[in-house]
């Protein structure tokens, strides 16, 4: 097995077990490893792959397939997919069995309250990491922050937010 395939397995199996509440929390680590550490792709390629993974149906974590494909072809895509999803699926299955048995215990309620802010913090860290990875002016930073605030505090459809942001850019220019 090639070194790149082993690196893909090591990276995504580890991130799989750290992705509490979804893959968004590990996007900064994924970007750092794929772009800065292993140089499988550029920051722009990563952002393009991130956009593609968010626009396609299915979990956003499918970006790992695109990274694996770029790093090691079809074998890399397959290995990355298995490494990202198999460990967490197995862990969830094992934990769910105990979790359901502890439905009315105090420690379960405490853990649920404790993990909520961690998930929110990891999601915001992902957003900040992606914002830093792009070349922005103050207008684009402002639009990103305003869109994030509106998305987090209202029930505005994300497609509408994208359209509003595009409209502002067309009127004002980047």
Image (cartoon, helix red, strand yellow):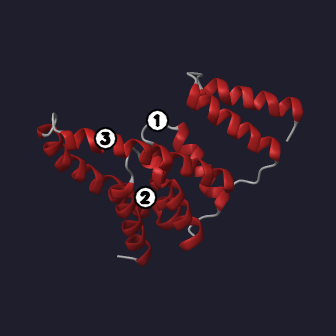
Kind of element beneath mark 2: helix
Residue pointed to by mark 3: 112
| Mark 2 crowdedness (10 Å alpha carbons): few <14, some 14-19, many ≥20 | many
Q: CA distance from mark 1 to mark 3?
A: 28 Å
Q: Residue furthest left?
A: 101
* Label 1–label 3 contact, CB within 8 A: no
| Of 46 and 24, the residue lying toward us | 24
Alpha carbon distance from label 2 to label 1: 17 Å
Residue 77 numbered mark, or none:
2
Q: Which residue is mark 1?
A: 57
Assign a secondary structure to mark 1.
loop
Identify the residue shown where x is 55% and y is 37%: 55
- Residue beneath the point at 79% across and 27% down: 167
Which mark is on residue 22?
none
Instruction: Tell how many labels.
Output: 3
**Which dot, 2 or 1, sits closer to the camera?**
1
Image location of residue 29, percent across then percent down: 50, 61
Q: Position of residue 27 (x, y in %)?
A: 51, 54
Alpha-carbon distance for marks 2 and 3?
34 Å
């Amino acid at each position: 097995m090639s070194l790149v395939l082993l690196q893909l397995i090591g990276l995504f199996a580890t991130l799989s077990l750290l992705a509490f509440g979804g893959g968004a929390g590990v996007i900064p680590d994924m970007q750092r490893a794929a772009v800065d550490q292993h140089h499988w792709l550029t920051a722009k390629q990563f952002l393009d792959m991130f956009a593609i993974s968010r626009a396609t149906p299915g979990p956003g974590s499918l970006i790992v397939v695109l990274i694996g494909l770029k790093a090691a072809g079809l074998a890399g895509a397959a290995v990355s997919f298995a490494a990202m999803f198999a460990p967490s699926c197995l862990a969830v299955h094992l934990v769910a069995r105990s979790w359901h048995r502890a439905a009315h215990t105090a420690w379960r309620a405490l853990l649920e309250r404790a993990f909520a802010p961690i998930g929110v913090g990891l999601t915001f860290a992902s957003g900040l990491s992606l914002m830093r990875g792009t070349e922005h002016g103050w207008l684009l930073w402002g639009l990103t922050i305003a869109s994030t605030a509106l998305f987090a505090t209202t029930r505005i459809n994300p497609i509408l937010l994208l359209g509003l942001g595009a409209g502002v850019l067309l009127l004002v220019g980047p």
